[in-house]
């Protein structure tokens, strides 16, 4: 059981090479890649439980707002 967890962790690790000792550039690339993975968003979402009906309601409200925004900007 332990081995499979390690394999999963390694699969999702971000590996950024440091070229010529340029740590600032490597850190910038790491931050960008980390943001793209969406891990932080998942962690924040899992802090508190939201009911499935509430999730559906929020997604519906977002879709309505997007449609209104598109209509206003198209005209």
Image: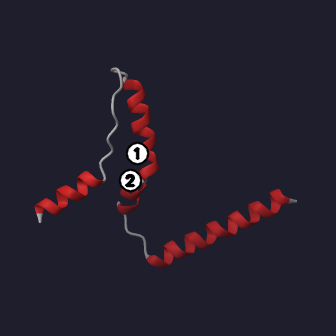
Residue at figure coordinates x 43%, y 55% from the top left: 41
Residue at figure coordinates x 49%, y 79% from the top left: 53
Q: 6 and 70: which one is in front?
A: 6
Residue at figure coordinates x 42%, y 70% from the top left: 50
Q: Picture coordinates of residue 37 (x, y %)? A: 42, 52
* Quarter of the figure that contains the C terminus: bottom right
Judged from the image, the secondary structure of the residue bearing numbered disc 1 is helix
Query: Are the two marked residues, 2 and 1, in contact with CB atoms closer than 8 angstroms?
Result: yes
Q: 72 and 5: which one is in front?
A: 5
The coloring applied to the image is secondary structure
Look at mark 2 in the image and give the residue it sits on.
Answer: 39
In the rendered image of this protein, does residue 30 appear above or below residue 37? above
Look at mark 1 in the image and give the residue it sits on.
Answer: 34
Q: Picture coordinates of residue 29 (x, y %)? A: 43, 35
Number of marks in picture: 2
Residue at figure coordinates x 83%, y 59% from the top left: 74
Q: Earlier in the sequence, mark 2 or mark 1?
A: 1
Give the quarter of the image for residue 45: bottom left
Local crowd at mark 2 within 10 Å, few (<14), some, or many (≥20)? few
Residue 51: assigned label: none
Q: Picture coordinates of residue 27 (x, y %)? A: 39, 31
Q: Picture coordinates of residue 13 (x, y %)? A: 29, 48
């Amino acid at each position: 059981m332990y081995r499979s967890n390690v394999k999963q962790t390694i699969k999702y690790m971000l590996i950024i090479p440091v070229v010529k000792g340029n740590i600032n550039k490597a850190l910038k690339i790491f931050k960008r890649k980390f943001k793209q993975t969406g891990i932080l968003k998942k962690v924040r979402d899992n802090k508190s439980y939201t009911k499935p009906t509430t999730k559906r309601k929020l997604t519906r409200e977002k879709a309505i707002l997007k449609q209104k925004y598109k209509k206003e900007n198209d005209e």
